[in-house]
Image: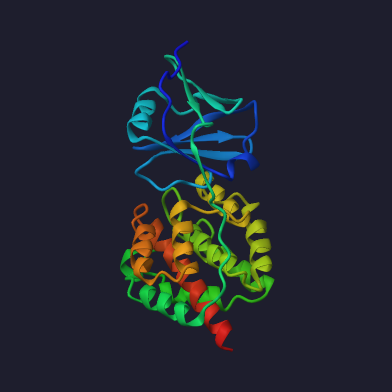
Amino acid sequence: MSLNRNQTNGEKSNMLPLHLFNKDHGIINTMFQHSFNIDFPDLLFHVGNESDSLSCTGITLEDDVVDELLKYIDVNDPVSFIKGKLYIYTKKEIRTIDLAPLKTVDLRIPQIKLDLDFLKKIIEKFSIIDFQNDWGLSDEYSPNKVIEMLNESRDPEQIMKTLKFLYGRGRGLTPSGDDIIVGFVSILSAFGFKQLTLWKEQVGIILESRATTDVSESYIQAVLENYTSKKMVQFLKVIRDKDEEQLASSILDIQNFGHTSGTDTLLGMYAAFILLKSKSIH
């Protein structure tokens, strides 16, 4: 049996204790160039490198540590979580990750008081994004139409119709429609939108259909529990603090995530900001 001898630096989400328990057992679910997922009974646990944004469903480790792990592991390798440590049973040896020394990061969605003047500045920044050419849905759909659908959905039937159009729509690890949902609900959550509970109820219902990817499902579920990615939290704190100097860069940080995921998430956020503005004026 071979164990990792060197302790590593990194970060962990404060959401983990809600879904990861002592003596949980899982398997390596998916592997990527610089990260991998472990499928536990109540959590799709993400292990990423420090160069990427911390996911609310996992941890980040030093880049070379993750690269080394990826050389040993394979999909379906068993994993156990025992007394704060991950034990990965590879074909050659047992690799361990001690979560205790990792820095805990608060990834709860911060609560923000609506400031109409700053909201207008946010919308101005979002309005210059080329959603039509950069988003993940095909040309047969219009970003403006999606924004319109989201903002005109006011009762359970309308909301469900919009969610059925978006949920699982698109290709990739996190379909574009799901990223739009995550962005939209994240902003409504941060500002305590009066119909937030209604939206969350309908999103919870559609999640039961399991008609999207495991990764996407885990991110949507996290938002329903009021957790999101580190990049999103950083953006929301910029808004909360009305830090206009950091606004453009924090938007770009989100946009640079994935192939189109960042832009799709921003579209959902943009729709929410437009909705908030319309409700605050009328």
Q: Nearer the viewer, residue 171 or 63?
A: 63
Rendering coords of residue 46 (x, y %):
48, 39
Is 5 on the left or on the right of 281, as rendered?
A: left
Is 129 on the left or on the right of 241, as rendered?
A: left
Rendering coords of residue 277 (x, y %):
52, 81
Which residue is painted at 58% across and 70% down in the image? 191
Is 2 on the left or on the right of 25, as rendered?
A: left
- Vertical arrangement, residue 155 with respect to residue 111, above or below: below
Q: Nearer the viewer, residue 1 or 92?
A: 1
Q: How is the image coloured?
A: rainbow
In the picture as drawn, the residue positioned furthest to the top comes out as 1
In the picture as drawn, the residue positioned furthest to the bottom comes out as 282
Q: Quadrant of residue 110?
A: bottom right
Q: Nearer the viewer, residue 116 or 57?
A: 116
Rendering coords of residue 130 (x, y %):
32, 71
Rendering coords of residue 9 (x, y %):
41, 34
Task: Please identify the quadrant where the C terminus is shown.
Answer: bottom right
- Vertical arrangement, residue 207 with respect to residue 39, above or below: below
Query: Number of marks in the image?
Result: 0
Answer whether residue 190 is visible to the viewer in this image.
Answer: yes
Q: Quadrant of residue 242?
A: bottom left
Answer whether residue 136 is visible to the viewer in this image.
Answer: no
Which residue is painted at 57% across and 73% down in the image? 113
